[in-house]
Amino acid sequence: MRKSFIAENPSVLWFLLALSGFTLGVVVLSEAGGVAVISTSFVKTLGKTLCLCLIAVAMDVVWGYCGILSLGHFAFFGIGGYAIGMWLMYARTEAIVLESLASQVIPPTPQEISDAIGNQIFGVVGSSEFPMIWAFADSLFLQLAMVVVVPGLLALVFGWLAFRSRVTGVYLSILTQAMTLALALYLFQNDSGLRGNNGLSGLQNIPGYESTPQATISIVFFLASAFALGTGYVFFAWLVSGKMGSVVKGIRDNEARVRFLGYNVESYKLLIFTVTAIISGIAGALYYPQAGIINPGEIAPIASIYLAVWVAIGGRGRLYGAVIGAAVVSLLSSWFTGGGAPDINLGFYTIQWTDWWLVLLGLSFVAVTLFFPKGIGGLFDYLVRKQQ
């Protein structure tokens, strides 16, 4: 008799139970929950960490399971953030403009309102006109659709061009990195329509909920991030299980043999690449309202490299490994770079972790690669087998 999905993938149930317990604990201990053991700022940090865990799982599927080392998935993450950020910034600015113009004797025309909003948003780059890409910025529904459509379409076109040409290995990684670099350089320009280096700011102010405490808003986004991570984890676990999972892992191990067996390798790779890009966009749309700001520097190629490091440290080819790697590294990064870690005085030199954190991260990556190639997740597998 065929086993159920959960029976074949017990780690999924354990992960959901752990995530549910963690989520409940944070809600109860937060300021919104009344106990106030966990500050609102730290709740936002935890919510952002859950979003990073989601994109790490997506990266693990495309790299750890399908064998495509993409150095451009953070670009899709950033696109999702920009898509929702455009609506947040437009709606918030519109409310401010309407309030300021309400005292006028003669009611403003729609064009005057539009010009005032445009001047508020784009005045920082010396413009007041809305670019074409802001055509749907006044519609929450359409901008939410853009969170899915734009990353998916970009991944579909890029993947189709790359995979049909049978570009693989390090050459494909370089192409994905070049795509990310080109996008970041374009966004840095003031005439990109997205305020250049200034990016989009004030995203933590949700239109229509100005009087709602940030403690409550942070918990809502934290719960949404936890739900997205849980749903994404189950979806990806289902995607890489069964026959399709076997084909995908076969492509990773020996692409030529899978093609010889009659499978359309390019279609499988394109599907995985596109689906993971869409999920990455959703993760970004949840992340940046909690961060409050997004700029082109957020999606520079180095961000995608960090993403690969998280997955490698956690253990690629294990979905829970990607979650562990992203959570551990991102929280440690916040601790070290945020001044939480005390400086070490050696007498002749003082180690300041804000400067040395990246060195420590690099050494950790090298150590894992040399001594623990299966990552932290591999250690869990070893302990479980040992107990059995």
Image (cartoon, rainbow, N blue to C red):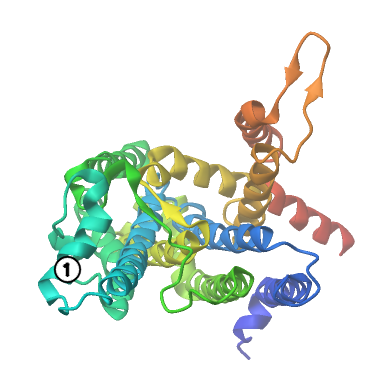
Residue at screen point 33% across, 58% down: 79
The answer to which quarter of the image holds residue 282 is bottom left
Q: Can you tell which quarter of the image residue 95 is in?
A: bottom left
Residue 346 in picture, x, y percent from top left: 82, 15
Instruction: Tell me the element at label 1.
Output: helix
Name the residue type under label 1: Ser
Image quarter for residue 351? top right
Residue 129: percent from left, percent from top:
13, 57
Residue 115, position as x, y percentages in the image: 15, 63
Number of numbered discs overlaid on the protein picture: 1
- Describe residue 44's horizontal placement relative to residue 128 as left or right: right
Q: Which quarter of the image is occupied by the C terminus?
A: bottom right
Query: What residue is disc 1 on?
Result: 114
Query: Foreground residue, 205 or 243?
Result: 205
Q: Is residue 176 left or right of residue 35?
A: left
Image coordinates of residue 198 in percent, x first then y, are 34, 45
Residue at image coords 46%, 59%: 288
| Circle 1 Cα neighbour tier, 10 Å, few/some/many (<14 / 14–19 / ≥20) | some
177 up-or-down from 133: above or below: above
